[in-house]
Image (tube, grey):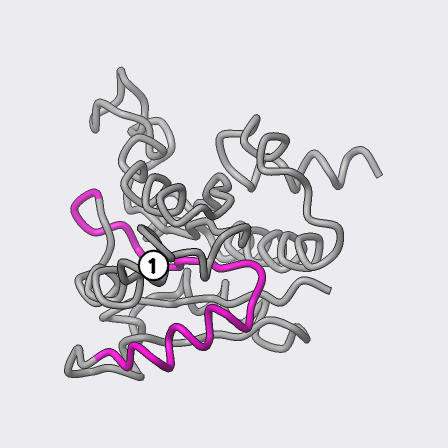
């Protein structure tokens, strides 16, 4: 079974119904661990050794966070800067994470249509997430498409419950026989892939 690690970063988690629902759907799943970075490191003093040990102990890594100004909350950036060290995660001798799968689970205030070249943001969401994908590639990890919740503030309760259930099903599927990154990257979002899996079973 593939062990999954969720690196969760939300500075205002108490006000997030979206991420509360997503985490509730997966917290009790065996083999899924959640590290709440803002709870662990309220003063941004990241324990590098502890975080690297957690990464080594898991097969699939998830960066889960809201999209803030086209990027991640600052603590997650701090985590990336410190934990993914040269000589450990990349560069000469930096092979600790090679072959592990990684992707982002993100929420956005904007609707899906806003994240198109002709939309109000002028680019796809995947374009804004390219630094994360390239970070994964530099560390010789298998970068997968993101799982995305658009229109986070407006999502009706029933729709949010369906999305959270879909997230839970995604993680259960990834714990099994993890498909090749090339197969998954045919899809814009992992949401689309897991929906297809449900319809073809």
Question: Where residue 34 sits in the image (x, y, percent)?
Answer: 48, 74
Q: Taking 198 as reference, is 18 above or below it?
A: below
Nearer-the-camera pick, 16 or 50: 50
Residue 62 magenta: yes
Question: Where residue 155 sits in the image (x, y, percent)?
Answer: 42, 50
Question: Where residue 179 sits in the image (x, y, percent)?
Answer: 68, 41
The single residue placed furthest to the front in the displayed view is 92
Residue pictured at 28% horizontal, 82% vertical: 47
Nearer-the-camera pick, 94 or 51: 94
Residue pictured at 56% horizontal, 41% vertical: 191
Residue pictured at 39% horizontal, 49% vertical: 139
Residue pictured at 37% horizontal, 41% vertical: 133
Instruction: Determine the image quadrant of residue 113.
Output: top left
Nearer-the-camera pick, 17 or 145: 145
Q: Is residue 21 left or right of residue 17?
A: right
Q: Taking 39 as reference, is 133 above or below it?
A: above
Q: Is residue 137 left or right of residue 169?
A: left
Quarter of the picture holding the N terminus = bottom right
Q: Which residues make up the magenta segment?
A: 46-70
Nearer-the-camera pick, 133 or 93: 93
Residue 83 magenta: no
Q: Is residue 109 left or right of residue 63?
A: left
Question: Where residue 152 sits in the image (x, y, percent)?
Answer: 36, 51
Q: Crowding near pointer 1: few (<14 within 10 Å), some, many (20+)? A: many
Helix, strand or loop at disc 1?
strand
Q: Is residue 50 left or right of residue 142?
A: left
Quarter of the picture holding the C terminus = top right
Q: Which residue is mark 1?
A: 65
């Amino acid at each position: 079974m593939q062990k999954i690690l969720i690196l969760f970063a939300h500075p205002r988690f108490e006000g997030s119904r979206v991420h509360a629902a997503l985490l509730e759907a997966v917290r009790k799943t065996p083999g899924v661990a959640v590290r709440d970075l803002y709870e662990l490191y309220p003063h941004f003093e990241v324990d590098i050794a502890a975080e690297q040990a957690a990464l080594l102990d898991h097969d699939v890594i998830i960066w889960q966070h809201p999209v803030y100004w086209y990027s991640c909350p600052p603590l997650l950036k701090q985590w990336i800067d410190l934990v993914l060290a040269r000589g450990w995660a990349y560069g000469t001798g930096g092979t600790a994470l090679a072959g592990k799968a990684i992707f982002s689970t993100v929420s956005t205030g904007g609707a899906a249509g806003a994240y198109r070249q002709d939309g109000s943001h002028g680019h796809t969401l995947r374009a804004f997430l390219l630094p994360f994908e390239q970070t994964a590639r530099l560390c010789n990890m298998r970068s997968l498409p993101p799982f995305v919740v658009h229109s986070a503030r407006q999502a009706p309760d029933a729709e949010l419950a369906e999305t959270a259930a879909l997230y839970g099903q995604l993680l259960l599927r990834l714990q099994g026989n993890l498909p090749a990154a090339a197969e998954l990257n045919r899809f814009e979002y992992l949401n689309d892939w897991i929906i297809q899996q449900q319809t073809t079973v």
